[in-house]
Amino acid sequence: MKGVRLILVSGFFLAASVVWLVPSKAADADPPASVEERRLRVDIQQELAQIRAKAENLRLKEIELKTLQEEVDKKLAELNKVRDQVTTLLARKDEEENKKIRELSKMYEKMEPAKAAEVLIALDENLAIGILGGIKSKTAGKILNSMEKAQAARLSTEYSTLGLME
């Protein structure tokens, strides 16, 4: 936005300098008094042409910048829309996963503690912790008791820090 303002201010000063440098009609009507005056008028005309070309170039650049800004804004709006869709899909996925874990917890709760312990050890640690979290404390204690001490300690530690890591 600062770049656009800078271009606009520059264009204003260029336009103001063009007005200042334009010779009056009376000066154009008078024939040059000397070679030096003729050379100065030619130089002024050349500079005036350069200033007009720069002013036109600035105008075109300003149009280009506005177009690019509109494109960027449009792309940003599209990206925000996609991000919102992805966020919604991820939330839905997490909800489905949590539902499945609750169902699994009910199944493991009905299993014999030794068999449940044997299967939990073979599962992904995060899944095992999620399942343990959905089982009643008394049943979870029996399952952990059926595991080797090191495995039960690791799962217990991970389960106890579960809320802190999220």
Image (cartoon, rainbow, N blue to C red):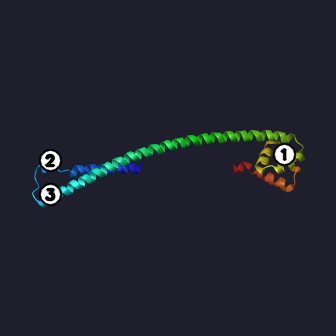
Quadrant in the rendering for residue 44: bottom left
Q: Secondary structure at mark 3?
A: helix
Residue at position x 83%, y 44% in the image: 137
Residue at position x 32%, y 51% in the image: 10
Q: Position of residue 119 (x, y in %)?
A: 85, 47
> What residue is shown with label 2?
25
Q: Name the residue nearer the viewer: 50 or 114.
A: 50
Residue at position x 24%, y 50% in the image: 18
Residue 2 visible in the snapshot: yes
Q: Secondary structure at mark 1?
A: helix
Q: Secondary structure at mark 2?
A: helix
Q: Position of residue 84 (x, y in %)?
A: 59, 40
Name the disc covering residue 38, or none.
3
Residue 13 visible in the snapshot: no
Q: Name the residue nearer the viewer: 54 or 97.
A: 54
Choose the circle earlier in sequence order: 1 or 2. 2
Disc number lying in front (1 or 3): 3
Q: Position of residue 133 (x, y in %)?
A: 78, 44
Per the model, the C-alpha gap separating discs 2 and 3 is 15 Å
The three-letter amino acid code for the residue at tag 2 is Lys
Name the disc covering residue 105, or none.
none
Choose the circle earlier in sequence order: 2 or 3. 2
Q: Residue furthest bottom?
A: 36
Q: Is there CB contact under 8 Å for labels 1 and 3?
A: no
In this figure, what is the number of numbered marks? Answer: 3
